[in-house]
Image: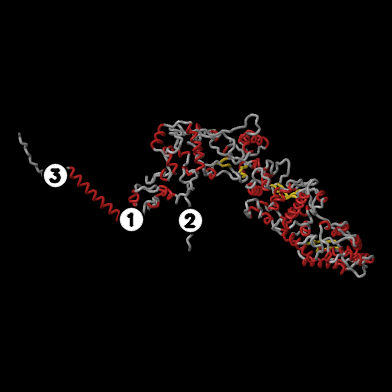
């Protein structure tokens, strides 16, 4: 057996080891590792922050952020805080850090930041669409590999779509089509391939302005052009429409640039063929006065010729409290002009209504309109502002109400002071002087014996409203020439003294009159007593033929007795019977107030005639017969007939025509307000105030005002053009405000008109619209043959703005696809859609103003 040969190992030389490449690589790696550690250590030691650890540059909008912890909640502020980033953090917490600067709603982490109800409605609609269309292969593969339904269910974080650290010029708002497609149940490759068809785009609700384009183009414009050639008729769409600065809203030009040519006269009432051109605001309703008197209803003074209706505005003012609302509800079922079959309770309700109307008119005169309307209770419980009250009353002049009162209810002051008053629980509580006058004065039934001081107090209170009879300050031969409004007792006494002094001077200078008066005094009359209101009272005391006409004449009997001549015999019985004492003064009544103080009696007429003859003789002796004598004779004749000459201005213009350009006027038994033009504040204020509490079919006074002003034949014609929407459980709304960008909030589609109008180039066709303009996309829908009213106009007869028929046909996807395809124009998702449907805002910083 052969033994194996053993070989010896041969040692390699040192030069051969150094030539081995693996040996060099290992040493290089160790050196690089050591250098890395040294460099990192130096970086941590020498760097001021942790910016060098960022995976990439921030976008320009976030370039000012220095600390990672501003966005990453797991990142600290120390140099070793990067270790926290090695572990998964809370993405929701990081997203909440974004909301410190970007203001978003509470639904920020829902898909599209929309509410759950909106998302459910949209998902149900898209699911039906997806079931009827095939999905492309690429979409199915993507959905199988990267399913995102569970991600959407948990909520989307900001980093799902917005990836930072992609560079300074990176667009954070850019989202790829694949990102959108990953979540949507409807899968499609591009807009021109599998994108769903449009559904009634772009009309989501009816327009706020009722404007039938087809009716204007085919009928109204040609008629106006033929009848009024000088009037300007719109010839292009841009005459009325403008995309404005926001570009998303196709707005309508102002009224004075578009509609005023034809519709202004309708607003101010020039074209009204029937009915009043003004709005009846205050009225004195017609009553069955005969039946009320037969049933002994204490209504006081009330005209029998009025045929006016109780205006809805007065119903609102009367129903300012619970009692007033009950009163209006009671009389609403009563025919005020025929009360023959009314029950006792209804008669009582009508009587209460009469005095409530009187108190209202008295309050508007004695106080301020703002006090009467400031606390109107329409149901909101909010006190009305001063500007709103001004608009509700349209700054009605006080003199208009006073003149109406003087003709309708001339003795209103006396009635309020002494007439029947409601019982304590029935007080209306007007915030004016009527409360004091009605509450503090005792009635006739409560105080059978009137006190003279109390009577003077009544006069003072009545004078607050300036409704009491004036006081004579200058007279001639018993006729008052100058009247002054009574203010207080001191002023009245001073006026009497001045009148007596003037009469005495006249008596001394006129000899003939004194002689005739002396002759009359022999017959039982005193020549020393001037025949003014005091003398008249004395005469009535002596003859017992008349009673004092007002509180002052009654209270002046004692003064008249002192002024009588001793030569005049007195019948004590007659005097005692005709002249009541201070304890027996009768209360002032409406029926007792007459104008007999202004008419001279027989003795006064004889004195006037004597004065006239004396003047004629004196003029004849001097040989001067001129105009002065004729004027004296004319003045004497006027006094003899019992009235002074009055210079009146006659006019053939009725009050309604006088207020041609709007404002207040009075006609018959109503005070009317005529609209002043477009955007009339009076109508706008009442519609805005009552609309919120006026659901359709409601019988409240607020609803009555709203229905009155929105009727198709209403003055102002507001709802002829402005649509009325029903608000669920919140009354009705007149669409005075035009659509704005805010009205587009919540919509996914983002269409801008402006780029479609821009010119392609000089000398080329204008955009894609060519010569058809707006009609390229918007096709007019006309009424079917035989129909008088188009479906568009019929949709405004009900209050749901979403239930309508558009004036234009819907825009089709095929029309948009002619340009937006693979080869022509962009078709990415964000071109027409926006992700955050309600927008994202950056709030302003609340920086305090530095102190000096």
- Specify whether 305 is left or right of 327: right
The numbered mark, 1 or 2, whose residue comes first in the sequence reads 1
Location of residue 782 in the rendering, given as x and y in whole percent from the top left corner: 61, 32
Disc ID at residue 48: 1
Helix, strand or loop for disc 1: loop
Q: Of 450 and 100, which appears nearest the observer?
A: 450
| Residue at which label 2 appears | 846
User: Furthest-top residue in view?
Assistant: 785
Image height check: is 29 above or below 446? above
Which residue was labeled with disc 3? 17
Q: Is residue 564 above or below residue 71?
A: below
Quarter the N terminus occupies: top left
Q: Secondary structure at mark 3?
A: helix
Separation (CA) of disc 1 from disc 3: 46 Å
Question: Picture coordinates of residue 637 (x, y %)?
Answer: 88, 57
- Earlier in the chain: of badge 1 and badge 3, it is 3
Q: CA distance from mark 3 to mark 2?
A: 74 Å
Disc 2 is placed on an element classified as: loop
């Amino acid at each position: 057996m052969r033994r194996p040969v053993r070989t010896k190992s041969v040692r390699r030389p040192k030069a051969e080891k150094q030539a081995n490449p693996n040996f060099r690589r290992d040493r290089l790696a160790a050196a690089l590792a050591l250098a890395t550690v040294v460099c990192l250590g130096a970086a941590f030691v020498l760097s001021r922050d942790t910016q060098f650890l960022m995976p990439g540059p921030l976008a320009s909008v976030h370039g000012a952020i220095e600390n990672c912890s501003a966005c990453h909640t797991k990142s600290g502020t120390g140099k070793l805080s990067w270790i926290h980033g090695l572990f998964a953090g809370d993405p929701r917490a990081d997203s909440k850090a974004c909301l410190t600067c970007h203001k978003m709603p509470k639904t920020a982490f829902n898909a599209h930041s929309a509410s759950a109800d909106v998302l459910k409605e949209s998902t149900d609609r898209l699911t039906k669409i997806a079931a009827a269309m095939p999905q492309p292969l690429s979409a199915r593969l993507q959905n199988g590999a990267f399913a995102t339904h569970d991600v959407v269910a948990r909520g989307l974080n900001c980093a799902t779509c917005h990836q930072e650290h992609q560079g300074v010029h990176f667009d954070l708002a850019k989202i790829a089509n694949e990102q959108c497609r990953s979540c949507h149940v409807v899968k499609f490759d591009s807009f021109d391939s599998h994108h769903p068809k449009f559904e009634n785009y772009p009309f989501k609700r009816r327009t706020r302005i009722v404007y039938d384009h087809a009716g204007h183009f085919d009928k109204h414009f040609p008629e106006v052009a033929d009848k009024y050639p000088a009037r300007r008729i719109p010839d292009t769409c841009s005459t009325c429409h403008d995309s404005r600065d926001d570009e998303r809203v196709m707005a309508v030009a102002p009224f004075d640039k578009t509609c005023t040519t034809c519709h202004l006269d309708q607003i101010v009432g020039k074209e009204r063929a029937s009915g009043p051109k003004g709005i009846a605001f205050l009225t004195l309703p017609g009553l069955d006065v005969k039946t009320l008197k037969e049933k002994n209803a204490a209504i006081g003074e009330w005209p029998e010729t009025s045929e006016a209706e109780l205006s809805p505005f007065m119903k609102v003012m009367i129903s300012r409290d619970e009692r007033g609302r009950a009163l209006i509800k009671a009389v609403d079922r009563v025919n005020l002009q025929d009360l023959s079959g009314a029950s006792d309770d209804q008669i009582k309700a009508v009587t209460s209504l009469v005095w409530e109307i009187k108190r209202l008119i008295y309050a508007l005169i004695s106080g301020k309109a703002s006090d009467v309307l400031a606390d109107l209770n329409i149901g909101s419980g909010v006190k009305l502002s001063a500007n709103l009250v001004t608009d509700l009353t349209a700054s009605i002049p006080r003199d208009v109400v006073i003149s109406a009162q003087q003709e309708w209810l001339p003795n209103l002051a006396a009635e309020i002071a002494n007439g029947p008053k409601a019982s304590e629980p029935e007080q209306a509580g007007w915030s004016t002087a009527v409360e004091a006058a009605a509450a503090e004065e005792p009635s006739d039934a409560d105080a059978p014996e009137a006190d003279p001081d109390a009577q003077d107090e009544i006069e003072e209170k009545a004078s607050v409203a300036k409704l009491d009879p004036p006081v004579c300050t200058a007279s001639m031969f018993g006729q008052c020439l100058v009247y002054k409004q009574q203010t207080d007792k001191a002023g009245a006494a001073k006026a009497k003294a001045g009148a007596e002094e003037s009469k005495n001077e006249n008596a001394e200078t006129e000899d003939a009159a004194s002689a005739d008066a002396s002759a009359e005094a022999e017959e039982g009359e005193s020549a020393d007593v001037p025949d003014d209101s005091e003398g008249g009272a004395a005469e009535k005391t002596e003859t017992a033929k008349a009673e004092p006409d007002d509180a002052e004449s009654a209270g002046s009997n004692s003064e008249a007795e002192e002024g009588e001549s001793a030569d005049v015999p007195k019948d004590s019985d007659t005097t005692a019977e005709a002249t009541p004492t201070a304890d027996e003064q009768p209360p002032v009544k409406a029926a007792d107030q007459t104008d007999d103080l202004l008419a001279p009696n027989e003795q006064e007429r004889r004195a006037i005639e004597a004065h006239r003859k004396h003047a004629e003789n004196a003029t004849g002796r001097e040989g001067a017969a001129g105009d002065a004598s004729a004027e004296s004779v004319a003045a004497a004749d006027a006094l003899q007939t019992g009235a002074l000459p009055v210079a009146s201005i006659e006019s053939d213009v009725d009050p309604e025509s006088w207020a041609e350009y709007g404002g207040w006027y009075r006609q018959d038994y109503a005070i009317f307000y005529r609209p002043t033009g477009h955007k009339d504040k009076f109508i706008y204020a009442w519609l805005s105030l009552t609309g919120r509490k006026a659901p359709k079919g409601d019988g409240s006074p607020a609803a009555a005002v709203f229905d009155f002003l929105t009727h198709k034949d209403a003055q102002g014609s507001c709802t002829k053009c402005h649509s009325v929407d029903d608000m669920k459980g919140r009354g009705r709304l007149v669409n005075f405000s035009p659509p704005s960008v805010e009205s587009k909030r919540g919509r996914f589609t983002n269409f801008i008109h402006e780029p479609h109008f821009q010119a392609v180039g000089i000398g080329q066709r204008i955009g894609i619209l060519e010569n058809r303009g707006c009609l390229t996309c918007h096709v007019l829908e006309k009424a079917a043959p035989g129909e008088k009213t188009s479906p568009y106009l019929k949709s405004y007869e009900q209050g749901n703005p979403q239930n309508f028929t558009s004036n234009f046909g819907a825009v089709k996807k095929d029309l948009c696809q002619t340009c937006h395809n693979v080869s022509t124009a962009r078709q990415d998702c964000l071109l027409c859609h926006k992700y955050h449907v309600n927008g994202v805002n950056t709030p302003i910083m609340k920086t305090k103003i530095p102190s000096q």
